[in-house]
Image (spheres, grey):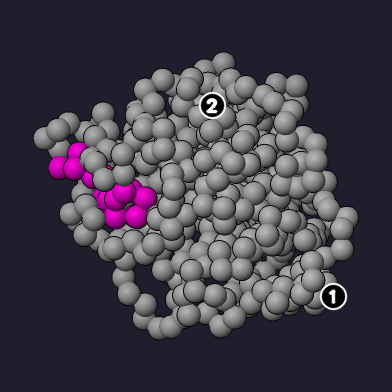
Amino acid sequence: MRELSLAAGYKAQFTCSGLFSGGKTLEQIERQELTNIYPSYRPVMAGLPDAVIDRDAKTVSVAFADGMPPRIAAWRPHLGCASLPPGASDVSILPEAKVSETREFRRGVWPRGEKVSSKPLPEGVNGAQLSAALKGALDGEFGGVTSAVVVVQDGRLLMERYTEGFGPTTAQRTWSVAKSIGATIIGAGVLDGHVVLDEPAKLSAWSDADPRSAITLENFLHMGSGLGGQTAGNRTDAVYFGGGLVNEHAVANELIAEPGESWRYANNDTMLALLALREGIADDADYLKFPFERVLRPIGMRNTYLETDWEGNFILSSQVWTTARDLARLGQLYVQDGVWNGRRILPEGWAEYVATPAPAQPGCRREPCRGYGAQFWLYEGYPGIPSGTYAALGNRGQIVMIVPARNVVIVRRGYDHRDARFDDAAFTAAVLEALE
């Protein structure tokens, strides 16, 4: 019964997000979001009835068993879709973000607005070669199933390509690119004094006598909390679409190593870092609008939805829907060391901080290999890719490649699966070669 409930929650959550955040058709959602899912859910998902959609209320319900209430997901402005707990139907319990709006970034050339410069490409950029690389990505020459590619150099959007059904304002799930967005929001929280990197996070769920209370915010960002997991692998389905709460599930894991002494890629570490920020801000309304007013709106990420659980805890290990252009803005913020239009958004040196290897991660078994910083992946020793390159990466081929040495940001969105993987390093090298 639990797997049925989770599968119904998955279908409700992804259908809700796809419809109301992504603007997708039901056929697109079925093909892109509900196909090539976790193998354990496939036979169960196939037996579920069609989702019941209320477009006025922006809710999606999926029945899964006779005599049991359906699983329900509901959409809200800014926060996208949230899954109600099993058995619940009252969407009024869901919190909302009261974000101050401004029209400042609605007009003008990217990144300020959504217009693309009509000026000739800069000297030294081989337009035909760059276009061929982007076309190759969409045509499958680098593997995978590509939906969008965007290339930015020196703060200018040089070129973008989209597959059929996608465009500049099409939001797509980021998967674990959300972790890097989360680290960015944490950076703003550090700058504002809400949290401190090297001090114990002291989550309220853990008493002072609890050894977990010694875990620092930096441990969370480095995937070095020392916490174990309740499920095999890095699965947090109970929170993502099971209707569970971050402040119940993520805090329940016990220590399996001393904080800072081991590296374990874990969704829970990211969720707990954002929970620490919530407790540091100490005002739920301020917390819910903080990412938008301090980071996303100032840099023009207006088509980005940060999803929460039903009590308003951000699930920034995976639950974000956004556009390729908005992710390019995120990358550009890091190229500019956290400064945007003369305003410091992130602490000085934050870009270097997230791109510095986490201390407890295992060494490379073979070169080249990806390292890990603070919620970003590091690329060293890859042919054609300069030293110091780092990236936000997510499941199914979500990529925000940041190349400080060249002032370049490369975004690739996709729907990869086990039999179709995208070669991000080869694509990055091909793009950079065209920019020389």
Residue drawn at (47%, 54%), measured in percent from left and top?
351
Of the residues shown, which amino acid type is indicated by label 1?
Ala
Up-down: is 107 above or below 420? above
Give the image location of residue 318, x and y in percent: 52, 47
* Residue 140 visible to the viewer: no
Q: Pick out the residue farthest to the front.
A: 342
> Which mark lies nearer to you, 1 or 2?
1
Of the residues shown, which amino acid type is indicated by label 2?
Lys
Q: Residues within 10 Å of mark 2 (few under 14, many from 20)?
A: some
Residue on which disc 2 sits: 289
Give the image location of residue 432, x and y in percent: 67, 74
> Looking at the image, do the residues carrying marks 1 and 2 touch, with CB atoms under 8 Å apart?
no
Residue drawn at (73%, 42%), measured in percent from left and top?
112
Q: Residues within 10 Å of mark 1 (few under 14, many from 20)?
A: few
Give the image location of residue 30, x and y in percent: 72, 49
Asked whether, in this view, residue 347 is left or right of residue 363, the answer is right
Up-down: is 248 above or below 155? above
Quarter-wise, where is residue 299 in the image?
top right
